[in-house]
Image (tube, rainbow, N blue to C red):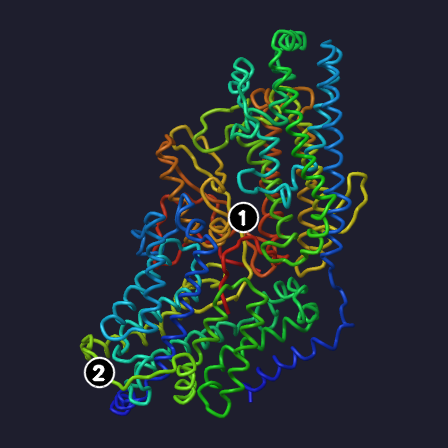
Amino acid sequence: MKKYLAIILSIAILVCGCKKKKEEEVLFDRELMLKNYAENIILPSYKDVQSATSSLISAINTFDSQKTLMNLELMQEAWIDAYNEWQYSSIFNIGPAAEQGLSKALVEEIATFPISSTKIDNIISSGVYNLNDFNRDARGFLGIEYLIFSGLNISNDSTLTLFQSQPMRMQYLKDCATHIKTKIDYVTSQWEGSYKAEFISNNGTDVGSSTSQLYNAFVKSFETIKNLKIELPMGLRPGQIQVEPHLVESYYSGNSLLFIKTHLKAIENTYHGMSKNQNDGIGFKEYLESVIGGPELVQSTISQWNLVLSSVENISTTTPLSQQIISNPQPIENFRIELQKHTRFFKSDMSSLLGIAITYSSGDGD
Amino acid sequence: MIEKIHSYLNTKVAAAPLISFRLIFGALMVFSTVRFLYLGWIEDHYTDPIFHFKYWGFEWVEPISKTGLYIIHYLMILSALGIMFLRGIAYTVSAVILFLGFTYTELIDLTYYLNHYYFVSLVCLLLIFMPNHISPFYKLGEQKVKRSAIFILKFQIAIVYIYAGLAKINYDWLIQALPLRIWIPANDQLPLIGPIMTWEITPYLFSWIGMLFDTFIVFVLIYKPTRILGYIAVIIFHTITGLMFQIGVFPLVMMGIVTIFFSEQWHQKFIRFFIRKEKSFSSPKQFITKKLILNYFIFIFVIFQLAFPWRYLLYPGNLFWTEEGYRFSWRVMLMEKAGTATFYVKDTKTGKEGIVDNSEFLNAHQEKQMAMQPDMILQFAHFLGKHYAQKGVYKPEVRAEVYVTLNARPSKLLIDPYRDLMKEKDSFTSKDWIIHYQE
């Protein structure tokens, strides 16, 4: 009899499927979540960085026409503002911002660090460059930072002199800014156009689904903070014999900590499904709360996240991160430890509970 | 008794089921090899990664060049066609190439271990020893083989299903409906059956149906009056699991090859549907396999298949947690497990300890598999130790902090995070650096 039972039940289930539609109860609607991400988080972040980049370009043009100390400072402020906005978008390397053919993910195209000051100096002296070649460490937001800030111990007066004596520096700066703008414009227009609908309707959990892509991009971005922005400059990779402060993000203007904090905020917003103006919509957190084991995980995640945030607040804001790595590394190390403790909650625990496929290969068949 | 078994197995029976098994299995091998090439998996799986996880005892298997791997896959396609249509020595040589080619590629990296790849390797191995005088182009009524040939294939299929079914008889699967309670709701967007996936009862039903199906389906197929119902169940079951999970060609393979349980007449019709003409039978020069060796081989094969999956009983602790004795035992889709593994490499002269970024060395699939399986963690630790020793780290100590979640439970430490893994070796003995799971 048992053998029949199996067959009859499986057929019965197939048949029932067509009738009983009303019983959908605590169902989580991934499509609503994706809609919230697209409309309230991702697209606004691109629009913001787009307009901040436009402001940067006009500040550059103003400076070009009148090379004064004040205009240099205004341009620097516009850069800080634009790169700060970029932190929010830097997570979403999916769809039009994903790696495609020869072009890398947007974050690598326009925000590679550390940059190579040697390459940039060579470009300025030779005037030879191609913004589509593989030298991504000679351009992007952080290439611009080098051009307009020169360095921590270099005064703005000296930078101003550099611009006055090197017309190529100005030319390259303008081209780099336009290059960034073009890339951001493209991604923004795709999100404003057909990609948004495609993103929202691709609502499964398989490996190519929007949920899976977004989740992978989110975790990768989170790991970047610990692996690249903290561990590398602290000299914590095996084989590194000493600290390497020049490897921090934003070495030349010394705003590393500001950008890390914004990056953390962007990660937090993404987890909660929250927009920049604190409208808390449906996000990964709500998704987790709807699955088995999820509420417990959300609780552990949030309490560990609070430790991450309080540890980063303990790092002094008065001295650049690259200097504190040498003079006062303990608070940074504490921050790293809290990030390390947090990793499993975002990485394996979350993907496991949500049943999101993260790799393309076939799994074990039944 | 032994006499009886002996004469039962040596009775000559119609060769048609074996001929169509070869046709179906060969066609599936052609399809899955072409799919593998098309998906670019030679690059992704074999030639792109910097590091490969090895099978115990097969550490010497290395990927050859990309061209070489392509040639092997082309040869596999040809030899799969060979087992479908050739006979005599040409058939046996095809089977040998198919077995060696497929098994070699599987042995390159443990990351991609799948029970069904193991199953395919075993079937290819069995096909080498099959009678080779038969062919779909000759009169089917005149072609006979010893029953043992068909028996051993049925036996292998039975082992897969029954052991997979028995493995499902555990607390998490039947009482907690785990991991299906995690996986099933994630499939709510499937056409037609999507809405069912959100019902609370569905994971429980699927768990029990799955267990009963796997355990009993072979008997349902053997018993003639229930055979058709059984095959309908096979189709429904494998179609649903195929839609729900990312399991590649496996559902097709099973739907194809369980037809071996069908009658001789069915197979004759099946073969003649595709190959209309038939020549009258003539026996080709046979590839001689010594009868005695063959019988011993089958005997050892059967004993091994029956016994090997039970080796886990010799290890302490929770099998799902330690995975000691987990592989090669038909435990399929049994648990949801994932981990985050952080490796620390210490220079024993300076005392300086560094933190590894796994993605420098592993692709996403390799990292995911490694982060929850102790033997793979150990292999990666040894790789890191050697790698950084070459980079100038003095006699490195390597330790790993590994947090693993099993069936939606909060993650816990899998291994002793302070143990120097460079001092540990992989063997069949139990690993004392695993921290046993406590609720």
Q: Residue A259: which quarter of the image?
A: top right
Q: Secondary structure at mark 2?
A: loop
Classify residue B6 as left or right of residue A284. Answer: left
Position in image of residue A152 (x %, y %): 62, 15
Taking the spot 48% from the left edge, 45% from the top edge, the residue there is B417
Mark 2 or mark 1: whose residue is earlier in sequence: 2
**Spot occupied by residue B435 in the image (x, y as percentages of width and height):** 48, 54
- Residue drawn 41% across the image and 68% down it: B313
Task: Residue A310: tell me if it is visible.
Answer: no
- Residue linked to disc 1: B340
Residue carrying label 2: B283
B436 on left or right of B63: right
Q: Position of residue B98 (x, y in %)?
A: 32, 65
Q: Amino acid at mark 2?
A: Ser
Q: Amino acid at mark 1?
A: Thr
**Residue located at (20% from left, 75% from top):** B287
